[in-house]
Image: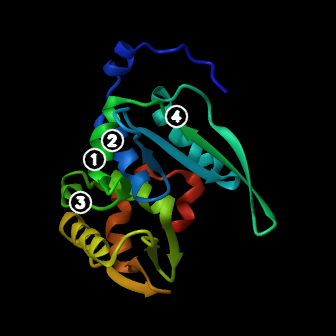
Amino acid sequence: MSFKPRLTNNDKILLGLTPRVKSIIIGLILSDAWLQKRGHWNSRIGFKQSIINFPYLWNIYNELGYLCSGLPMAAKTVTRGKIFYSVFLQTRQLACLNEIFNLFYYTKNGQVIKTVKQELFFYMDYMVLAHWIMGDGSKRAKGIVLCTDNFSLQEVVLLVNILILKFDINPTIQKEKNKFRIYINGKSLMKIKPFILPYFVDHFLYKIN
């Protein structure tokens, strides 16, 4: 569904990312979003949420809508005989997104692989963390578990150390079914809560309350 005028290549070149938008995107990529880049084409973002999380996706669209050519679209998938409804958005292919693509992806034997690089340290801030928690965090006891199942142990260790250095908290690594996840305990959560709260949408406040 598109209602926006078609942009010329020069128009696309002029589009850029504010520090706020860049932090939002990095938080999304750490959680549920993905970046695509084919050959010599520029990168684009894809982001999908369950229909029950539409308030969050709409919030993201309000922030990233200027990078998109159309409105969020509904999708239906069938998994193990069950129907699931979701909503997704996709940006245009834009040069301004290549920096973030290079931060999270590399190519090996012709295959694009998602990773965590040391340079992420310089991008990590409270807004990134807020969107990471909203997208991939789940409440556990008085703390939060960040689902990092798609990252290796080495990458999870790097993420934990970035959190320690940036926010002066004490996250730990938990192993669940051969996957490694990050746990932020209640004391650390209370320490960062005043700084991430301004970026939370009401729909996900239960995760940090």
> Which residue does the image show at 33% across and 75% down from the upper left?
188
Q: Which residue is mark 2?
A: 22
For residue 69, the mark is none
Q: Which residue is mark 4?
A: 62
- Closer to the N terminus: mark 4 or mark 1? 4
Q: Kindly identify the amino acid type of the residue bearing the numbered disc 3.
A: Lys
Q: Which percent across, then down, holds residue 3? A: 63, 19
> Which residue does the image show at 54% across and 41% down from the upper left?
59
183 to the left or right of 50 = left
Q: Nearer the viewer, mark 3 or mark 4?
A: 3
**Which one is in front, 207 or 177?**
177
The image shows residue 36, relative to residue 118, as above or below, that is above
- Closer to the N terminus: mark 3 or mark 4? 4
Q: Kindly identify the amino acid type of the residue bearing the numbered disc 2.
A: Lys
For residue 117, the mark is 3
Between marks 1 and 3, how big is the CA–CA gap?
A: 9 Å
For residue 102, the mark is 1
Q: Nearer the viewer, mark 3 or mark 2?
A: 3
Q: Which percent across, then down, holds residue 108? A: 30, 57
Label 1 environment density (alpha carbons within 10 Å; few <14, some 14–19, many ≥20) = some
Q: Kindly identify the amino acid type of the residue bearing the numbered disc 4.
A: Asn
Q: Which percent across, then down, holds residue 207? A: 52, 67
Between marks 4 and 1, how big is the CA–CA gap?
A: 25 Å
Q: The residue tagged with tag 1: helix, strand or loop?
A: helix
- Closer to the N terminus: mark 2 or mark 1? 2
Q: Kindly identify the amino acid type of the residue bearing the numbered disc 1.
A: Asn
> Which residue does the image show at 32% across and 82% down from the upper left?
172
- Closer to the N terminus: mark 2 or mark 4? 2
Between marks 2 and 4, how big is the CA–CA gap?
A: 14 Å
43 to the left or right of 61 = left
Residue closest to the far front: 109
> Which residue does the image show at 45% across and 62% down from the upper left?
133
